[in-house]
Amino acid sequence: MEKKSNFGKFLLLWAGELISSVGGGLTSFGLGVYIFRQTGSAGSMAMVTLLGFLPTLLLSVPAGALADCYDRRLLMMIGDGCSALGVAYILFCMARGNASLLQICIGVFASACFSALLEPSFRATITDLLTKEEFSKASGLVSLAGSARYLLSPIIAGFLLSISDVKLLLEIDICTFFLTVISAAVVRRGIGAKEIEKKEPLLKSIKEGWNILCEKRGVLTLVAISSVITLFMGVLQILAEPLILSFTDAKTLGVSESVCACGMLVSGVFLGIKGIKGYYVKTLGIALIFAGVFMFGFGLWENIFIICIFGFLFFATLPFANNCLDYLVRTNVPDGAQGRVWGLIGFISQIGYVVAYGVSGTAADLLGQIDGRGVGRGAAMVILIAGICLSLASVSVLFSGDIRTLENS
């Protein structure tokens, strides 16, 4: 029987995630500026980012299995709602005085633990709601929502920090959690909870998800390559802020980050309207190769205009890469296993981010000291190296026979 489209309900759910993305971006930007002003260290900024990311990585596999065993919309509500507690803790510490690096780390880690429930359930819910023909457009819109934390949040946060302080950003973020929980509740009421015929033990469910993933060698190869690629992309995520803050202020940083993220907006809107009709593997490989080239240009000169141009071009490639990766995986995994498989994919592919977050900040501080020009140029040197490596690693996508077989499935 042909699946009924629920694109309207998807748009409501997507709107909630868009708002959540903006709120999370405000907190991320504000805490980054706050920590850099307090410590002047890229390593400290990287530590907070790492602790905010680790729960998402470590809990993605069990969260994916839970998404196949329990009500996915309810899990999204719990994850979004409870993650506000970590942000509230940081706000409480700041209200009593300056929050220490340790207190910020605790709050970010706690918030991320609950947020880990969200991603596999959200991706699996998209499969529940939409037809196969709508996947590409949905992926473009999801990329657009994700880009909001880079497009809208920085410029809003930069302006708010010029008239207030980071506490206002945290308060706004806490408010957005309620809106996203409401949107998930409305969708849940509209389509009801998905009935689970048989609830399997968690470890058995994870094992079966791994077996399904291994059955498609091309998917496993693609995910392994993605892990290497995320290593180099994570470097830019960590070091862009200390690079720019080393020679300008938070307001300029906010504007420049938003300008760069406009690349994701342009590509995301295009893909949301047109989608991609074929040549997914070729498009994926080319997009990632150019991403590395533009990343290299990002770190070449200490000039905000040049940084914005290359940053815009870098972000413009990401929705194309994400769209192709999403399609190739989604169309090669059974609907009933989407949650647990996406959880495993998230775990494997994002290991590279852990390495980047753990190493890049310290490397930038060290190179800055050796070079004698400070953390900003140290960050630039690390970005240049990572950009070259990203382009070289991406070439493997174009020549992998296992990955090419996915497009014909």
Image: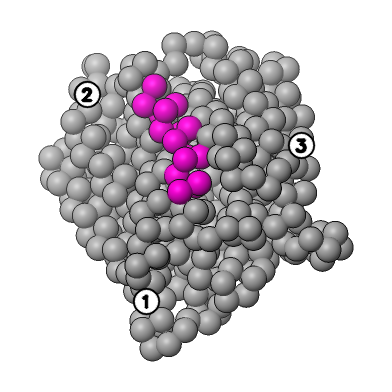
Where is residue 18 shown, x and y percent of the image?
A: 31, 45
Question: Percent x, y for residue 380?
Answer: 72, 49
Q: What is the C-alpha distance between the residues marked 2 and 1?
A: 41 Å
User: Which amino acid, by three-letter code, is at mark 3?
Assistant: Cys
Q: What residue type is labelled 1?
A: Leu
Please determine whether, in this image, residue 315 is positioned above or below residue 180. Answer: above
Q: Which of marks 2 and 1 is in front?
A: 1
Residue identifier under label 2: 5
**How much space separates mark 3 and mark 1, taking CA atoms?**
39 Å
In depth, the one of 295 and 186 nearer the eye is 295
Query: What span is colored magenta in the figure?
Result: 255-270
Q: Between residues 349 and 244, which one lies in front from this camera angle?
A: 244
Q: Look at the image and tell me whether residue 265 can be seen.
A: yes
318 or 82: nearer the viewer: 318
Tell whether position 33 is magenta. Answer: no
Return the residue found at the far bottom.
96
Q: What element carries label 1?
A: helix
> The N terminus is located in which quarter?
top left
Reading the image, the residue beneath label 1 is 91
- Given the image, on which type of amino acid does mark 2 rest? Ser
Task: Identify the residue at image location x=51%, y=39%.
Answer: 260
